[in-house]
Image (spheres, rainbow, N blue to C red):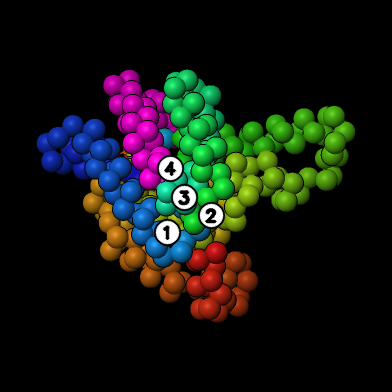
Amino acid sequence: MDGNGRWGTKRGLPRSHGHNKGVIVLKNIIKLAKKLGIKVLTVYAFSTENWSRPVEEVNFLLTLFDKVLQKEIAEINKESIRLKFIGDLSPFPENLKQLICESEEMTINNKELTLNVCMNYGGRQELVKAAKELSKKSLTGEITPEDIDEKLFEAELYTKEFSDPELLIRTSGEKRISNFLLWQLAYSEIYITEVLWPEFNETEFIKAIIDYQSRNRRFGGIESISKESLNSSLYH
Ligand code: IPE
Ligand code: MG
């Protein structure tokens, strides 16, 4: 969800206005994703690198997460949306951690859509964590180094219960992965739009999906997969 700050600055407003508007956009996109039958939506809310921003902006974002979660959790639950937070949550303030924990517990059985929110998430950090876990298991004899394969590795990732993303939408024209889901994005289709996140909307989301549907996903092979299976994988 990139481009919040620039959107504010472009309007001669503080960056925080962009973050506030970004929340409204996210709510609209979640609603549409559910309506379209998308089962998993993963958003990058706060990266391991975002701590290096001015302390005022970091504090603003932490307060915003807290406020939005408190305000929206009942509605999210009513809509049968499951909330899951991905990343190392340990450095967040106790009250936010508590709220995160309660929201996850409250929505754990919701089936319509899972919303993964990446918070203090970094792809490299996730891979290092997985390597550490496997190395511990190997030391205790639970596994041998030869046992390690993609399946065992994946089982140590935050996303172990989900299939890999089919589509990555990157807003604000940036053409990089920025440490997002490094393992999981191996074969994802990438859609880049110049639109800043606060200006992203339902039409832009549909545009990205239609673009995705025209792609020929070969997964390193030469056969194109059928349109039918493309559609069913979009709505997996
Ligand atoms: C993304 O927008 C929101 C968060 C990181 C929370 P940015 O804040 O990165 O906005 P730009 O990239 O500076 O415009
Ligand atoms: Mg940015």
Which residue is the site of mark 4?
A: 44
Which residue is the site of mark 1?
A: 34
Q: Indicate the amino acid at tag 4.
A: Tyr
| Horizontal and vertical percent position of residue 226 | 55, 79
Quadrant where the C terminus lies?
bottom right
Which residue is the site of mark 3?
A: 81
> 10 Å neighbourhood of mark 2: few (<14), some, or many (≥20)?
few
| Horizontal and vertical percent position of residue 71 | 34, 36
Specify start and end residues of the magenta stretch as a single range.
Answer: 47-76
Disc 2 versus disc 4: distance between alpha carbons? 21 Å
The answer to whether mark 2 and mark 4 are in CB contact below 8 A is no
User: Judging from the image, what secondary structure is the residue with disc 1 in?
Assistant: helix
The answer to whether mark 3 and mark 4 are in CB contact below 8 A is no
Q: Indicate the amino acid at tag 3.
A: Ile
Disc 1 versus disc 4: distance between alpha carbons? 18 Å
Callout in the foreground (3, 4): 3
> Ligand 1 within 8 A of label 4's CB?
yes
Disc 1 versus disc 2: distance between alpha carbons? 10 Å
Image quarter for ligand 1 equals top left
Which residue is the site of mark 2?
A: 111
